């Protein structure tokens, strides 16, 4: 038992932080100490954390740049919301329906990730970045022209408009093009969000510290050497990319079941969202799962805390972002930091010596 | 007849993409970074012209010059302040995120000064439209003519500059190998600054032409054209000047034709799909060079 | 020792890059348990020959047989699975992985368990991981690296990085080990120690080894047979003493 704790100390701390934060927030909420604005932000925050953690598989563990993560979230959001809306009267037990919805979001996003990954993962660096961005945009655009309706004859599809569905009088439009899906049952809440974060962490952290994770990181560090020891490059790249996409799908499920009306806009599923998630990952430390969580929290709350400054807040956000990047990555600043405040900062990972299979997972 | 007019519109839009892509491809070639702020320089250029011409009612030529100068200075400043300190950073992601930060910064400064409302941009082109065809059914606007001409001129001047001048050769050397270039006595910092200056000046020109043809100006006007220009540069083979030109033109034509014949909502998706197909078939783009890692 | 049992048989291997024949009509037979040297001046095509043997390049002509099995044209991964492991001239470690994990990555195809077992932490995960760690530590001990097991590979001093690369290659349980200039950049003491280690693993693991070396003195100490490459072609082959006294070889190395 002691051995187990020692070996998994780092992971246990990560789980612990999430659970403690949850308990504290629940307590504060029950005491009415948190504004309703903040409360409303909790579920999206959970979704962002899952997104950041899952993107870290691609960026930190696999070492490839993806700018299409929001696209996978979009797939998860729409497929699960579609399912929930269709079955809301069939499966009346909410938690069963929601569990299935989560699985659907996970699988659909994972499959799309797999299908996209197959042709594009042989591209590298910025080429891969622009192609993933392109895929994300395609997914978002397609969602905007998709119409699905249902009547007694079954499902009807169109990419033109709702009328083209040719529904019967009694039929209902489920996906209404740019208006998206309205009336998704609101099954998400903060507790579910935290549980999903924990499950995501469980999957990701266990995967990193395993034969598969080692293979993926070996590919990241040196493709040619990884091939020379018989590691199947395509297989493990696809594995990492698909799991990353699938978990983004879960975030999408959480997100869509928190909204009464789900639309694919540039703001929620466009490349700007993908970039925002990437910012979480990079600021939290590439490959550093706990850092992703912390930076997702800080960077989501920061604009809200600055709300009093209205127009200035995004400007301050931008300046803080640039300053933090310069401070944490510039070689000169690094020297300065190493001498003075290194130990106080959570992104010190790069300078510390880590043992065992811990690399990338602390 | 309508197909030809769509085609001309496509070439015109493509020329704008090509001008941005030319700047992008040079900056990328030398700094090896996705400069997300490149598109926002377009927007800054447009607001500058807008302020001088529409708000202050000063002559258009002054607006054009001030806009180009301002963007040039802005480009150099951004590189020196935000990108240069990160040139030696261990991860190329650091400078990418910083570029995103700069992009947010420019957008939000514009938002503070000009507000979120769409401004109607007054065309900087004052040439009469050309009527072609027996019945005058084919109209080519002055903007289109100027845009295509500007693109061709810029392309020729840039190619000559890079191939024939010392500074241009220095750019090639620095983009090939910074360390070796430095050893050969090339001032690497100055060369990179010059590249950003040229890229930003081109962005300003492209911005004016873009907004002359599509006059809606907001703080976010530049971001999508910026991304598309990068797509065009990748399409043609990044680092290649003729590649950026060809990529830009093809991209513009595909966009306009799919808007016209397939779906206006899906035109971006189609552009991106073509990019993906090109890259999957030819991972270095149409004119890109293949670089293999030595074992 | 079954000295007549060929592990590697290469016949008439050739490859051209553009107009240049980087390796031209290269043939060699290496017997089980042999320590064979491939030498030649810079640019002679030694590393290209290695890249052909390990599937990095596909030969234009020729056949490669490993223990009788034709492996010509297979991928690097399949060739490794078939039983050829290698090191690289410019060290290629998994630099951000620990020393232990570098070797465990080498054990990737030797010890396996499913992705499900790792995500759900099934008993199989713990069992196999334990075996892997034990095996990896055993290998590290041979190279005196066991005390550095938890360091990042990039934190090792240069000489130890070279050793770690050999340990990782050995972990894949090869029939034939290819070492590309293992002593490059080492000081005389380190080189001596490394040569001892190579002799040791040859005995201990009954390993067949093909060694590229630039420095003839080094090879003469431990290899029985040599092939000398020059401009992609075989200049001389045979027993070490024979080859080293060959006037062509001396000319190639010392110039006119």
Image: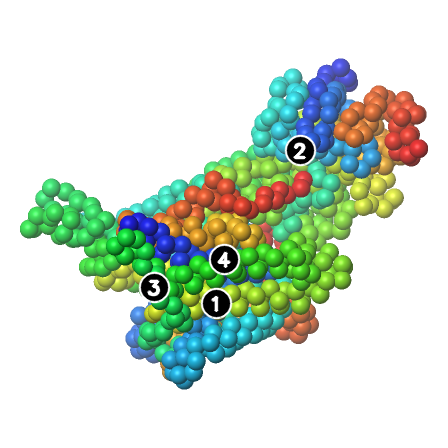
> As drawn, is C36 to the left or to the right of A312?
right
Tally of numbered discs: 4
- SS of the residue under disc 3: loop
Residue B236 visible somewhere in the drawing: yes
The reply to whether the C-beta atoms of the residues labelled 2 and 4 are less than 8 Å apart is no
Q: Which of marks 1 and 3 is in front?
A: 3
The reply to whether the C-beta atoms of the residues labelled 2 and 3 are less than 8 Å apart is no
For residue C85, what is the image quadrant? top right
Q: Quadrant location of the C terminus of chain B? A: top right
Check disc 4: other Cα within 10 Å, few if <14, some if 14-19, many if 20+.
some
Residue at screen point 65% across, 17% down: C68
The reply to whether the C-beta atoms of the residues labelled 3 and 4 are less than 8 Å apart is no
- SS of the residue under disc 1: helix
Residue at screen point 41% across, 61% down: B145
Which chain letter matches label 4? B
N-terminal of the pair, mark 1 or mark 4, is 4
Which chain letter matches label 1? B
Q: Where is residue B67 in the image (x, y as percent from the top left)?
A: 49, 75
Q: Compute the Cα span from label 2 to label 1.
A: 43 Å
> As drawn, is C250 to the left or to the right of C237?
right
Question: Against B63, is B241 above or below?
Answer: above
Q: Compute the Cα span from label 2 to label 3.
A: 53 Å
Q: Nearer the viewer, residue A121 or C94?
A: A121
Q: Name the residue under label 1.
A: B205
Q: Where is residue C47 in the image (x, y as percent from the top left)?
A: 73, 35
Q: Compute the Cα span from label 1 to label 3.
A: 20 Å
Check disc 3: other Cα within 10 Å, few if <14, some if 14-19, many if 20+.
few
Q: Mark 2 points at which residue?
A: C18
């Amino acid at each position: 038992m002691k051995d187990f704790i020692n070996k998994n100390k780092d992971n246990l701390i990560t789980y612990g932080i999430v659970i403690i934060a949850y308990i504290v927030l629940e307590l504060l909420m029950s005491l009415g100490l948190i504004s309703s604005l903040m409360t409303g932000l909790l579920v999206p925050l959970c979704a962002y954390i899952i997104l950041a953690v899952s993107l870290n598989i691609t960026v930190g563990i696999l070492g490839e740049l993806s700018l299409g993560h929001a696209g996978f979230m979009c797939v998860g959001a729409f497929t699960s919301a579609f399912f929930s809306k269709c079955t809301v009267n069939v499966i009346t037990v909410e938690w069963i329906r929601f569990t299935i919805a989560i699985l659907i979001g996970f699988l659909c996003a994972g499959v799309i990730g797999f299908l996209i990954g197959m042709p594009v993962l042989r591209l590298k660096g910025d080429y891969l970045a622009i192609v993933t961005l392109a895929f994300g945009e395609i997914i978002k655009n397609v969602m905007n022209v998709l119409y699905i309706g249902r009547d007694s004859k079954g499902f009807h599809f169109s990419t033109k408009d709702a009328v083209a569905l040719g529904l019967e009088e009694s039929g209902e439009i489920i996906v209404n093009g740019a208006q998206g899906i309205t009336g998704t049952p609101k099954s998400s809440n903060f507790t579910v969000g935290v549980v999903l974060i924990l499950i995501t962490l469980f999957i990701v952290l266990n995967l990193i510290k395993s034969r598969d994770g080692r293979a993926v990181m070996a590919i990241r560090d040196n493709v040619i050497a990884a091939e020379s020891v018989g590691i199947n490059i395509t297989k493990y790249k696809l594995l990492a990319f698909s799991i990353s996409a699938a978990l983004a799908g879960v975030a999408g499920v959480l997100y869509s079941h928190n909204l009464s009306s789900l639309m694919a806009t540039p703001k929620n599923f466009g490349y700007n969202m993908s970039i925002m998630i990437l910012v979480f990952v990079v600021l939290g430390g590439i490959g550093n799962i706990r850092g992703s969580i912390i930076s997702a929290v800080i960077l989501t709350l920061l604009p809200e805390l600055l709300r009093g400054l209205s127009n200035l807040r995004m400007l301050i956000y931008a300046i803080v972002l640039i300053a933090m990047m310069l401070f944490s990555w510039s070689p000169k600043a690094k020297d300065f930091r190493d001498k003075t405040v290194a130990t106080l900062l959570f992104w010190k990972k790069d300078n510390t010596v880590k043992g065992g299979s811990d690399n990338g997972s602390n | 007849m309508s197909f030809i007019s769509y085609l001309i519109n496509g070439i015109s839009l493509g020329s704008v993409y090509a001008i941005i892509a030319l700047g992008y491809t040079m900056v990328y070639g030398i700094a090896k970074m996705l400069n997300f702020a490149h598109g926002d320089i377009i927007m800054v250029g447009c607001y500058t012209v807008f302020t001088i011409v529409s708000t202050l009612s000063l002559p258009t030529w002054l607006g054009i010059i001030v806009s180009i100068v301002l963007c040039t200075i802005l480009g150099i400043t951004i590189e020196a302040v935000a990108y240069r300190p990160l040139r030696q950073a261990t991860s190329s992601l650091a400078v990418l995120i910083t570029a995103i930060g700069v992009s947010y910064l420019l957008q939000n400064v514009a938002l503070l000064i000009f507000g979120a409302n769409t401004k109607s941009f007054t065309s900087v082109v004052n040439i009469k439209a050309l009527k072609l065809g027996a019945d005058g059914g084919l109209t080519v606007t002055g903007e289109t003519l100027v845009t295509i001409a500007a693109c061709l001129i810029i392309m020729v001047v840039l190619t000559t500059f890079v191939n024939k001048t010392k500074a241009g050769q220095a750019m090639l050397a620095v983009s090939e190998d910074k360390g070796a270039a430095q050893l050969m006595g090339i001032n690497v910092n100055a060369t990179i600054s010059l590249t950003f200056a040229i890229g930003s000046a081109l962005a300003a020109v492209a911005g004016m032409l873009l907004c002359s043809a599509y006059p809606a100006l907001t703080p976010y006007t530049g971001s999508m054209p910026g991304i598309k220009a990068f797509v065009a540069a990748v399409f043609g083979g990044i680092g290649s000047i003729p590649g950026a030109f060809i990529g830009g033109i093809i991209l513009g034509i595909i966009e306009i034709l799919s808007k016209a014949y397939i779906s206006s909502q899906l035109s971006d998706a189609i552009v991106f799909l073509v990019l993906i197909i090109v890259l999957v078939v030819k991972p270095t783009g149409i004119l890109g060079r293949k670089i293999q890692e030595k074992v | 020792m079954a000295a007549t049992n060929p592990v590697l048989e290469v016949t008439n291997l050739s490859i051209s890059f553009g107009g240049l024949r980087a390796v031209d009509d290269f043939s060699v037979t290496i017997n089980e348990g042999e320590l064979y040297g491939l030498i030649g001046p810079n640019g002679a095509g030694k590393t290209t020959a290695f890249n052909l043997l390990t599937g990095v390049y596909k030969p234009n002509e020729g056949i490669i047989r490993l223990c009788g099995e034709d492996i010509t044209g297979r991928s690097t991964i399949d060739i490794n699975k078939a039983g050829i492991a290698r090191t690289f001239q410019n060290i290629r470690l998994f630099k951000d992985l620990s020393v232990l994990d570098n070797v465990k990555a080498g054990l990737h195809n030797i010890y396996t368990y499913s992705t499900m077992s790792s995500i759900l932490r099934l008993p199989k995960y713990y069992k196999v991981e334990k075996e892997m760690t034990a095996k990896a530590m055993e290998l590290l001990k041979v190279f005196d690296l066991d005390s550095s097991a938890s360091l990042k590979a990039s934190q090792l001093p240069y000489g130890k990085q070279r050793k770690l690369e050999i340990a990782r290659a050995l972990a894949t349980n090869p029939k034939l080990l290819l070492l590309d200039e293992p002593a490059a950049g080492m000081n005389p003491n380190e080189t001596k120690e490394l040569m001892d280690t190579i002799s040791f693993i040859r005995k201990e693991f009954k390993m067949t080894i093909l060694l590229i070396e630039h420095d003839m003195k080094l090879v003469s100490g431990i290899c029985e047979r040599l092939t000398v490459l020059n401009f992609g072609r075989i200049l001389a082959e045979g027993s070490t003493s024979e080859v080293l006294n060959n006037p062509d070889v001396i000319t190639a190395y010392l110039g006119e």
